[in-house]
Image: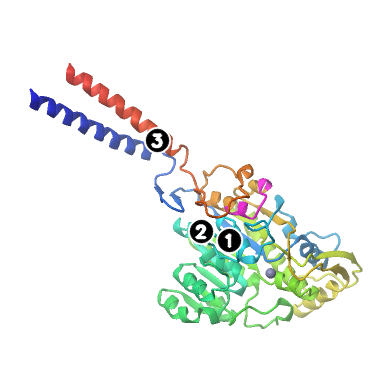
Amino acid sequence: MERNRFNKKKFIMFIFLCSIGFNGIIISLSSESSLFILAEHNSIQVSQTDEKQSIIILIGDGMGYGPIEFGRLIEYGLDGNTSILEFPYQTSISTLNIFGQITDSAEAATAIATGQKTGGARISTSMDNENLTTILEIAEDNGYNTGIVATCKITHATPAAFMAHTDSRHNYDDIAADISRHTVDTILAGGRVDLVSYIPTMETSGYSYVTNRTDLNEVSTLPVLGLFAGTDLSKVVIREENSTQPSLLEMAKKSLELLSSSDRPYFLMIEGSQIDWACHNNDGIYLAHEIIEFEKTVAFVKSIAENDPSILVIVTADHETGGFDVQYQFLSTELPLESDDFETKKQKRSARSQEISYYFQSTQHTAREVILTGMGPNSERIANATHLIDTFDIMNSTIFPYTPPVDTNTTDDTDNGTSEPDIKGKIPGYSKEIVVYCLSLTSLIYVLWIKTKLKA
Ligand SMILES: [Zn+2]
């Protein structure tokens, strides 16, 4: 009799465990995604779906509204339109850092790349030095091809914040080491000096390494490491037609050609790095050529996205520099034309930039809000964005199509960066609590049913 009861208990336990397993399988199979993995800390939830969408983010470093208007007047005239202002969704966002202060490029790029505010010129680390997962890393982990294009050195703050984690933007060697550890598929920028000791290892791991425009054109496979200057690329204003360095537009085109040649979706960050430096220098002609190069790159990306609704395009700036604005214009030089040769275009742009009266209020970054605009999947969320960190949520929700909309009311301005990062990406269709509840309830019903059977 005793033995029989013991066996009954064992049998009930066996059925209980089986039922949990059975339920787990049924729920996994019936979910909209065939696989989900929950990482415990700094959580990334990886979901497989057929609806993967590509992301292109263009950042004009230091680009306030003034330079956008300056570029419009020079390149297209009073009646012309600039691509940057022609996207379906547009808003203005704050760029302030975790302390509510004027940001630097490292803190701002961290906000864009990780959705978290920081301070102290940190590169994708919190104030207590925790690594903050970047959108590029999330994209990599989800099978995306990735790319970074910039006209500064690759270790500079903005590109660095997507690929590296360190407590200061000036830790160039730490940044270079982190970059070399990633598998970013197209790295096109300056920065040979900082990366020099890592280049051989990267070549061994499969990178085509190129240092000039001609060799870049020849590249037809991923991954590619293109470092076209020891440090930063030349200013557009002094760039010659036969320059050995590719332009921002050429790097963006090559990057997109390579990234889109695979079946995988891609993430690409393109930075117009020197708009900021032109504004720090209060140099109108320098600024004119940098903003127009950025505008031309935006126009190209926009034309690609108009033919491919699976691409999210985001255009923003990390902060405003120089308090720049235009005042009056006395434009008499003809508009630059597509048919003009390289030198004529350049001369017309320089001349027109001097026919516009403008002013700089400072040589530093300002607290002015910047543009956030774009098109494609989830771009309607731009309308609710209030800070740089919201661009992360928009991009992240494009990798995880089921993430709920950005709730700007819950943006916590008092977050001191010590709290755990928000869980990014949600399990499609149901929460963890509901799964546990369903499992327990069904298991209980099974056990009661078996018990009744055994009694009978
Ligand atoms: Zn700056």
Q: What element carries label 3?
A: helix
Along the viewing direction, whichever of 166 and 285 lies nearer the viewer:
166
In this rendering, would 276 be left or right of 421? Answer: right
User: What amino acid type should be assigned to the residue bearing mark 1?
Assistant: Thr
For the C terminus, give its image quadrant.
top left
Q: Distance between the residues labelled 2 and 1?
A: 8 Å
Tag 2 near tag 1, CB within 8 Å? yes
Q: Mark 1 points at which residue?
A: 110
Instruction: Find residue 435 and name its label.
Output: 3
User: What amino acid type should be assigned to the residue bearing mark 2?
Assistant: Leu
Q: Mark 2 points at which residue?
A: 132
Ligand 1: does it lie within 8 Å of the C-beta at label 2? no
Residue 363, position as x, y percentages in the image: 76, 71
When asked about the image quadrant of residue 14, the answer is top left
Magenta stretch in the rendered image: 383-392
Q: Which residue is drawn at 86% across and 74% down?
A: 354
Q: Sequence order check: which comes first, mark 1 or mark 3? A: 1
User: What amino acid type should be assigned to the residue bearing mark 3?
Assistant: Val
